[in-house]
Amino acid sequence: MTIFPALFTVFTMSDQRETILAAAIELYLREGFEGFSMRKLGRELGVTAPALYRHYEGKEHVLAEIMREAHRTFMSTIYRALEAPTALDRFFRAGEGYLDFSLGHPRWYALMFSGPAQIGMEKFPEDIEAMGAAIHQFWIDRVRECMDAGILKEGDPVQTSLTLWAHAHGLVELYHRGHFQIDVTQFRALFEASGARLMSGVATEAFAEELAQKYLNAEAALNA
């Protein structure tokens, strides 16, 4: 039995927005895009859908709030990599954080990488665009410092980071859509092995040799 209706009647306007958002997050994580509506959200809260419009202009604005929460959680996850001592450690820990988030929060992950039209907007609010840009810059910085450290070949860090991200995102999307009939442990091994193959093409010769061994280990785990 939800406690939202009781809380909704006694909270201030600001508190009510937080209560709505908490219920909206639960509803979205449970049912995704297809199952999300203001009417269902109202039922979660014990109020009519029109009552919600005093706080949010519409479904798309609620989803934008959920997207902000997803971005904040994702950023806090990958930014922990900055505590690592070396460029290579930061690169790999960021990648691990990315994979952990995408597997642990599949609906948030899907929402983050949706276009504005998918949630009923012409464009995202400036703050959401800024969070997306900060995440993009984070990956560029990880690639650039690996180039500076002689781990990755010299080149345009923007283009290299886009290539690496497209590969990672593609694998995650294929897994979430059921194209790999494997469990999560096997997918992690596949992700690591495939990433090592791709990185060997942008790595310096010395680091490519290390990746070859890493790839063999990951491949062995995948086939075990």
Image (cartoon, grey):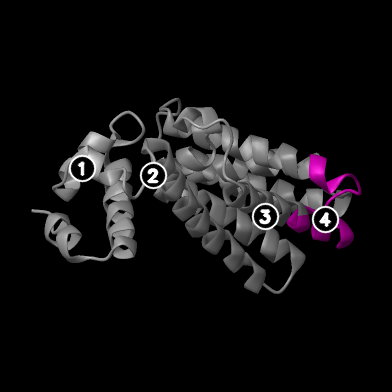
- Tell us which disc is closer to us: 3 or 4: 3
- Residue occupied by mark 3: 134
**Mark 2 / mark 4, whichever is N-terminal:** 2
**Distance in Å between CA atoms under marks 3 and 2:** 22 Å
Residue 197: x and y in percent read 70, 39
Name the residue type under label 4.
Answer: Arg
The magenta stretch spans residue 217: no
Which callout, 1 or 2, points at the residue further toward the start of the chain? 1
Q: Which dot, 4 or 1, sits closer to the camera?
A: 1
Q: Tell me the number on the disc at residue 146.
A: none
Stretch in magenta? 141-159
Q: Name the residue type under label 1.
A: Gly
The first of marks 3 and 2 along the sequence is 2
Q: Residues within 10 Å of mark 4 (few under 14, many from 20)?
A: many
Give the residue number, with chain letter if any, for mark 4.
144
Which of the pair 160/33 is nearer the observer? 33
Q: Residue at x 33, y 57 (%)?
A: 17
State the separation of the CA atoms marked 1 and 2: 12 Å
Residue identifier under label 2: 62
User: Is residue 138 shown above or below 219?
Assistant: below
- Residue depicted at 64% across the width and 73% down the height: 83
